[in-house]
Amino acid sequence: MTQKTQPNYTFALVIVIAVCFLIGFVTTMNNSMIEFCQNAFNLNNFQSQLVNTAFYGAYALSIPFGFMMSKIGYKSTLVLGLAVVGIGFIVNFLCINGNLDGDVSTIYWMFLGCMFVVALGIVMLQIVANPYVMVLGAPEKGAFRMTLSQALNSVATTVAPLFILNVILNGKKAQNAVPSDIPYPYLGLGIFALVLCAILCFLKLPNIDEGQQAAEATGVQKEYKSSVFKYPHVWLGALGIFMYMGLEIGIPSMLGAYFKANDPMPGKSGTDFLWLYWGGMMVGRFIGAGILSKFQPRVLLSACLLGGAACVGISFFLPGMGAVYAMLAAGLFHSVMWPLVFNLGLQDLGPHTKAASGIINLGVVGAATLTPLMGKVIDNPALGVGTAICMMFIYYAYVMWFCWKGSKVGLE
């Protein structure tokens, strides 16, 4: 009698977790480039926020990519995503490096186009990375592997702003940024992504058979509606993620404009302090993982919403850097809102859960639309950065309504 042995996927797991790190790093690095781009390309606030539009706008293709994955499989989607990320960065290097003597406006549009391509790859990776982390090893340790990958993702979001300060700017002030600072660091990232892609091509990865997983699941039989489109709380949850993105991305996106308008610390820029916001997000995720089991999700989400709103509100009454640190502290409360809002939108959906995940994920485009709108408000002399930051209270209010009311619509 032969005993079936568990395949050793340790090296494959290391590579996939590196992909999770890359996802967090590239996402946060892109947002942290706003102040850099404003100075390097001579942009107004609305134009600089198009960095968010180019990147997060790619999430509008989440559902088509989900269908593509069902056709070509998880591994092929993972490999294709890394290839697209690598090619996007390398084309960015070629376009910018080859046009440094040209018009900066043209270079900026090339930069945005290339970052949209990179974002397409990141969306593909988002779809498949977490499922692979769950299956690359013993089933009973799946939660540990997922926690580890999310922890490294959080570390990546903290490291990314420091990468901009110490590698792209290389010790220069953000106010002195120029387009020639971009190419070679981006070339390095492109090569790194393509190396991961090449390694994954030769790795044996397990098949993820969702149909078999569903068949093996046990539980009480329940009747469900005929279509995911008949569940209002799913669409309200997508709008909840849309508004949440205005919170998560809103503060780091507005910080550069706040420094420019108020100069709370002469000689410094918002980019110098972005790592504190993302570091707070990282700490908050670790704390949230520890206390989530002790509180109802709606209670914890409400507390985080009130805490974040309080930090932003207090910033209006504090002078100088006190206001900046108050806004940065909101990252601690924003850290666990994403999974809480997302899960409330996925309640009681049974066979429609996967389709609903794609719909709710579309809400990420909130970062692509709300921050440029806030930038437009800043550019209006009668309104300014304070009014743009006040818009965040609208986002807090909607997510709070969804928490207690919207997430229950159609489920009573």
Image (spheres, rainbow, N blue to C red):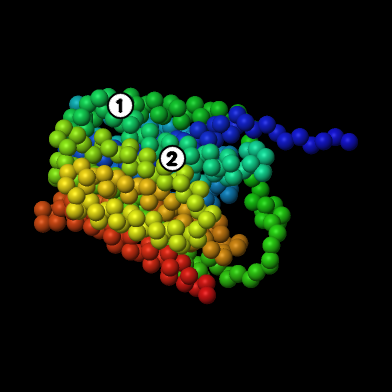
Q: Quadrant of the N terminus?
A: top right
* Between discs 1 and 2, the one toward the N terminus: 2
Task: Find residue 351 and report its horizontal and vertical position in percent.
Answer: 61, 61
Task: Specify whether 280 is left or right of 81.
Answer: left
- Identify the amino acid type marked 2: Ser
- The residue that appears at 22% across and 26% down in the rendered structure is 172
Residue at 62%, 43% in the rendered image: 142
CA neighbours of label 2 inside 10 A, class few (<14), some (14 to 19), many (20+): many
Q: Residues within 10 Å of mark 1 (few under 14, many from 20)?
A: few
Gap in angstroms between the C-alphas marked 1 and 2 = 19 Å
Disc 2, SS:
helix
Q: What kind of residue is marked 1? A: Asn
**Residue displayed at 53% across by 38% down:** 148
Residue annotated with mark 1: 166
Say which element carries label 1.
Answer: helix
Instruction: State the residue lying farthest toward the left.
Output: 381
Measuring 49% from the left and 51% from the top, which residue is drawn there?
Answer: 291
Q: Nearer the viewer, residue 293 or 14?
A: 293
Q: Quadrant location of residue 217?
A: bottom right
Q: Specify whether 134 is left or right of 383.
A: right
Q: Which residue is mark 2?
A: 154
